[in-house]
Image: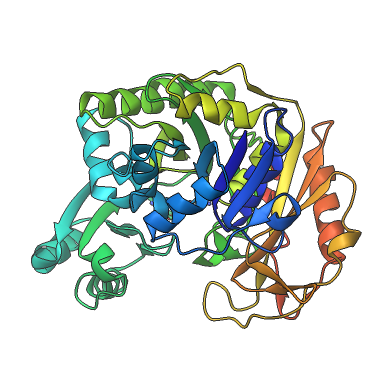
Amino acid sequence: MKVAIIGSGGREHALGYSFSKSPDCSGLCFLPGNGGTHQLGQNIEINLTDHNLVYTTLINEKIDFVVIGPEIPIVDGLGDFLREKGFIVFAPTAEAARIESEKSYSKQIMKKYGIPTADYREFKDTEFESALDYIREGSFPVVLKADGLAAGKGVVIATNFSEAESALRDMMLNKVFGDAGLTVVIEEFMSGEEASIFAITDGTDYLCLPAAQDHKRIGDGDTGPNTGGMGAYCPAPVVTPEITQRVNTEIIEPFLGGLRQESNPFAGCLYVGIMITNSGPKVVEFNCRFGDPETQAVLPVLEGDLLGLLYSVAKGKLDPTKVWHNGSVAVSVVAASGGYPGTFKKGFEISGLNSVEGDNIVFHAGTKVSDNKTLTTGGRVLAITSVDKSGNLSAAISSAYDSLKKISFTDIYYRNDIGHRAIKHS
Ligand code: AMP
Ligand code: GLY
């Protein structure tokens, strides 16, 4: 089958890398793709908000199966539109994607179906003063979340009242996140270690891929502002068999069941962001898609046919026998443009890409090819994933950093401590 992957990040490059190994994959198209994906298939520059144009492009390319990577086109209804036109699409409906696009919806479902998560209340912009009263009466730190999509930047952890007040004012009154911040979820701070779990589900049955851990902060030692994610590794040893069991029975099963009961079943990749607290796993967030950069660490430890797995879901019945963990570990370290997640310069040539070899893979993100040169175009530029087949995470980490040293571009920045928590555990 010929497959179209919608998106342009490292996650989409990693999906293409896995699909290309499937015996059923006869060709790949990336809409729009990046400076690395063209090595696996064809990149088609396109405006994803023009659904008719996407449709005619897919028809012209004789696409059999569409996989949507990022949340925005899913929430924007591209998957629904293409399904109505007869395409087979791996992506939840826009209605089910509200679990990510409206944090308040997600919290309401969790509350209604008894799923462990932080205590919270939601406030509209007309309730600014009541929200301040609620914060004043609570404890610190307190977590403020813009209700809508904010590219991973809509969460503020305020350590005192004045920080909380100013964050709330920015979200609700100064509209720094536009309409996404008009409603704000104010929730209890949870302490513990985080992990990301991808449950591939047809709405009822599900298959959890090995758990990963992201590194959201920009600086070593988890310092500085939040980013889209600076690196990940998989499997994450903090997610023990006991935690996995609890996540399945206390979180994933009641959540999928609750959504079915609400006549809003979720079929796709359910991203479960958990905090492992003293009283067990609690939900930090649900997302309606694969995580980035976790995908770049999860897919390389899988054996089997990921394409077949996703296709089975898109056809309505999960086939959980399609993939399994092959016992290896992987770490993925993101190289970013210096200045990210704030302002940064782009357009710099990347050198050394061809010197990365062995069990090391370069997944591109913010890159493009121009005049045979690969240039930086974004904040997160690329990620190096290193796989250790014997399951030795320290070896994979060393290998990733050795490979990263071979790559250079002006202002390159990466964290030096990806995987530090797992090393501490061992
Ligand atoms: P989110 O976009 O909801 O994943 O939040 C971004 C990051 O903020 C998470 O990965 C956590 O590190 C942190 N965070 C969000 N909610 C909480 C919470 N209730 N307690 C502690 N940390 C949180
Ligand atoms: N890495 C976090 C996310 O994909 O939301």
Task: Note whether 415 is above or below 296 in the view shown.
Answer: below
| Residue 12 position within the rendered picture, expressed as x and y whole percent measured from the top left | 60, 50
Q: Is residue 421 left or right of residue 273?
A: right
Q: Quadrant of the C terminus?
A: top right
Task: Note whether 351 is above or below 358 in the view shown.
Answer: below
Q: Residue furthest front?
A: 60
- The colour scheme applied to this rendered structure is rainbow
| Residue 52 position within the rendered picture, expressed as x and y whole percent measured from the top left | 38, 55
Q: Is residue 370 left or right of residue 198?
A: right
Task: Note whether 343 is above or below 402 in the view shown.
Answer: below
Q: Is residue 72 left or right of residue 11?
A: left
Q: Is residue 32 left or right of residue 185?
A: right
> What residue lies at 56% left-to-right and 51% top-to-bottom?
292
Residue 278 in view: no
> What residue lies at 38% left-to-right and 55% top-to-bottom?
51
Q: Quadrant of the N terminus?
A: top right
